[in-house]
Image (cartoon, helix red, strand yellow):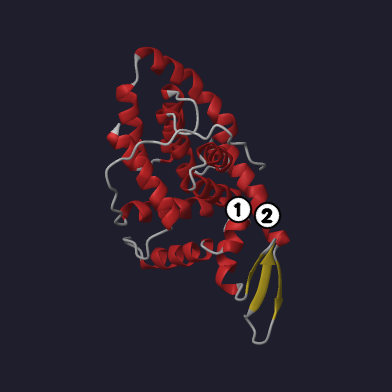
Amino acid sequence: MGRLAVLGMVILVLAWAGHASAQQADDATDIKRSTELLGGMESPLFVDAHSDLRYRNKGMESYREGRRRDAFHYFRLASRYADKTSQALVGIMYWTGDGVAKDRALGYAWMDLAASRGYPELQRQRQLYMDQLSDAERAKAAQLRPTLDADYGDVAGAKRLTLEIGSSRAQVTGSHVGWVGTVTASYGDNTVQDFSKYDKALHMNTAEYLQVKDVQWGLQMNSRVNVGDPEPVEPPRANSTRPAA
């Protein structure tokens, strides 16, 4: 169980900390492009306009504050937008019974979904889960796994992202101020003074956005994170209520 707790803590730390400042790649142009896009994705303007990032951040905040059931709820919402980090966290929470009723078969099914885009760390975790399942749990997982694709698979998630990306562009408002290229822009309650810095990120199409998120995952896993010994998991609060979406 120690390895499971450590991986969960690593994912939480990395997802909360953001991407690394440097990366390894063969193509200098790709490095520059990915760095520009990842920089734009860090802005509150961008996060607020993308449900996968917004709900994941709410889940991280809830988890950090000890509100496990709320965190689980938000990670599931983020998972509907093909967010592999959130899907992995849902799997870990099911597997360990952290904030939700323990269900190892369902935990494996979620980890299999999270690993479906080829992240090596999640593939190894999926195998670790598989090795610990009983025959009955494996049979149950095989039945549960296809049901997740309808609502949480990459095809369904990409469709939601496509609709949201188009909507977010329409809702961003901006006006040129002073010199050409300087723009004040707002989305919801968030405002940035130099909109040009985030323009490229906001205009990514769905396929490119998912590709850049894959790069972000690689950067996070290649960064150095010190994780201490696993700590006992706090039980869900008895009076925790499910937040509104």
Q: Quadrant of the N terminus?
A: top left
Q: Looking at the picture, how far across and down is residue 162, in whole percent?
A: 63, 48
Q: Which mark is residue 166?
A: 2
Q: Which type of secondary structure does the marked residue at label 1 adopt? A: loop
Which of the two discs, 2 and 1, sits closer to the camera?
1
Structural crowding at the residue carrying mark 1, measured as other residues with C-alpha within 10 Å and reported as few (<14), some (14–19) or many (≥20):
some
- Above or below — where is 135 with respect to 167? above
Query: Residue at the location (57% across, 38% down)?
Result: 73
- Res 7 quadrant in image: top left
Q: Which type of secondary structure does the marked residue at label 2 adopt? A: helix
Q: Amino acid at mark 1?
A: His
- Res 116 quadrant in image: top left
- In the rendered image, the residue lying farthest to the top is 136
Horizontally, residue 171 falls left or right of residue 24, namely right
Q: Which mark is residue 50?
A: 1
- Above or below — where is 178 with respect to 116? below
